[in-house]
Image (cartoon, rainbow, N blue to C red):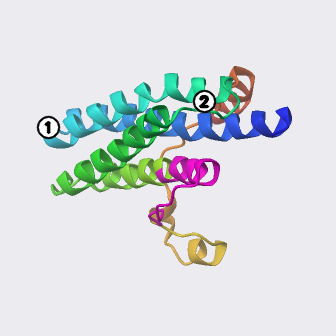
Amino acid sequence: MPSHEAEKLLHRVRTLLNHVVGYATILKEDAALAELVPVAEALRELHDKALSLRAPLDDYFEDEFILPPHDRQTIYAILYDVVALGQTAKRACKDPGSEDIASGIHRILDAANGLIGIFEEQLGSAISPVLTGPRTLSELEILEPADVCGRILVVDDEPQNREIPSRHLER
């Protein structure tokens, strides 16, 4: 794979992983404040699992996409654990007022499934991603404005790229 394509792929992987870690950080704090103990615990475990992916992913990219089967299994096992913990947290969101947390968990699951999709392409294994929420502009247009508001998480592995949107959002 040419180096510019490898850099693009690394950027996509890091962005999705940072998305999972970032949302898990925010949501576990929200769940703890809302005293949703099972949700907060599942999100804490999810956060820790997602962080544990950084080293194997760095190895994968440093070794030019050549990993022994054991390391590939490690990456997949962690990714599947992240999805399972996300599903556990989502099921635990039963209390009134936990809808925002459940919505954020859907975003985590989308990003985790995106990571699995990337490795499915790279390593030849298959799973079906879970699709949630509107996927087209026409689907988004039929939502009420209250359904569209939420949080913005700026995720990028380059500090310069994070700084500009952050400044605009602060205004």
Q: Which residues are magenta?
A: 113-131
How many numbered markers are drawn? 2
Please name the amino acid that badge 2 sits on.
Tyr
Q: Residue 129's spot in the image, x, y percent?
A: 48, 62
Q: Which mark is residue 120?
A: none
Q: CA distance from mark 2 to mark 1?
A: 35 Å
What's the residue type where badge 1 is placed? Answer: Val
Q: Would you say residue 155 is visible in this rendering?
A: no
- The image quadrant of residue 33 is top left
**Element class at badge 2:** helix
Identify the image quadrant of the N terminus: top right
Circle nearer the N terminus (2, 1): 1
Q: Picture coordinates of residue 88 (x, y %)?
A: 23, 50
165 and 102: which one is in front? Answer: 102
Q: Mark 1 = which residue? A: 37
Q: Is residue 35 visible?
A: yes
Left of 130 or right of it: where is 35?
left
Q: Is residue 30 left or right of residue 11?
A: left
Dot 2 and dot 1 residues touching (CB under 8 Å): no
